[in-house]
Amino acid sequence: MNVISVFVMGFLGGVPMEKQEQMHFEGVEKYVNERSNRMKYTVAVDDANQTIKKAWQNASGEKGVPKLFLVDKLGRIVYIGSASEEFLSLLDDVVNEKHSLEELIKAAREKEAKNTVYDRTRPLLHYGNGGHDTAYMYRSLLAKYKGDIKAGRSQFMLGNRKMVQEVGADLSYLYHLAYGDTISNRPGEKINSYGKSWPELILEIGDKTPFEFEYKKPDNRWNYSLIVPEKLSAGSLQEIIQRDMKTYFKYDVNVEIRKMPCWILTATKKAKKSLKAENPGNTYSIRTNDSFVTSIKNARITDLIKMLQRSNRNEPPFIDKTGINNEFDIELKGNLRNFEELKKALQDQGIVLKKGKKPMKVIVVRDSK
């Protein structure tokens, strides 16, 4: 069994930090020297940043000193508190590896339920203040993303649920979450909003910097968590998220219909007649040879739109007005990752892209009045 005693550092107003560190260390050294015959264990001194205090005492929600932390051989904290009879009894079990962490957790929760402590100066349920920290029915939480946990999205639009949780989300994503369509915006999906909803926010605000971010940096990114007492539809969850966004960020937001830019695909009469599949019903396939000739079999216009959208994400939506509803085979020559070459390759086969405009739903963000 190893015993380590850590002296945490208090602060003195008006005394330079370097001087405080020196006084703290000298005070601990004097204390230990005077009791060296009784202190037969390792003694450590916390730094001025209170690294140990923050990592152990603050993180546990405990106040006051001294405070005991009992750690088993697997590095798990099994007890936090004072040198009570409970501690002494548990110490023997831990040393002899007779304890069960699951049983200790169960017993601690039962004890907590019987002896709930409430400090009205601290948030309710935070670190067990007034009850267990999972005892809430409804919770809305926003925190700045620091990059210390992996970013991820909840994809709440996939069905009814009780929780929405976004980690490392930028403001544009959060506003799309709150006001955007609750179905897929990818072309080719059975049910989708592609070409019906504008993919970007319309920012009619003075300062746009809160919406600027880089994926490799935590700036202007957020962690958002919403838990509700019962499963709700995506639309009902959105209403709650909208209220939260208004509370947190203050912007006025409307969903409007505006004519927005798009690419319109049309087909020549010759293309409508000639574009057929040699073996209709076979699996869709696409192959490109070393000469930049791409052979596509059993395609539909939605497959071409998906290819266009994936290769040209900065372009506005591609809208099908070809009138071609059947499967077809097509051969495209050129580097299809180059938008101009792709347009020419399609035009050579009778499929023409022209710029146009189409009414779409847009999310408009304005400064609060």
Image: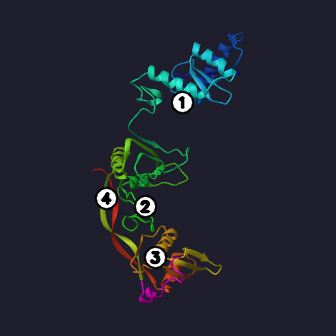
Helix, strand or loop at disc 1? Answer: helix
Instruction: Find numbered disc 4 in the image and state the secondary structure of the residue it sits on.
Output: strand
Label of residue 184 in the image? 2
Mark 3: amino acid: Ile
**Residue 94 drawn above or below residue 345:** above
Q: Which residue is mark 3?
A: 301
Q: Amino acid at mark 1?
A: Ala
Local secondary structure at mark 3:
helix
Mark 3–mark 2 Cα distance, whole angstroms, equals 18 Å
The tag earlier along the polypeptide, 3 or 4, is 4
Between marks 4 and 1, how big is the CA–CA gap? 43 Å
Q: Which residues are magenta?
A: 267-281
Q: Are marks 1 and 2 in contact (CB under 8 Å)?
A: no
Quick one: label 4 or label 2, which is nearer the N terminus? 2
Q: Position of residue 170 (x, y in %)?
A: 45, 52
Q: Amino acid at mark 2?
A: Ser
- Amino acid marked by disc 4: Val
> According to the image, label 4 marks what residue?
255
How many C-alpha atoms fall within 10 Å of the one at disc 4: few (<14), some, or many (≥20)?
some
Contact (CB < 8 A) between labels 3 and 4? no
Establish if 163 lies above or below 121.
below
Q: Residue at x 55, y 18 (%)?
A: 65
Q: Quadrant of residue 124?
A: top left
Q: Mark 4, mark 2: which one is toward the viewer?
A: 2
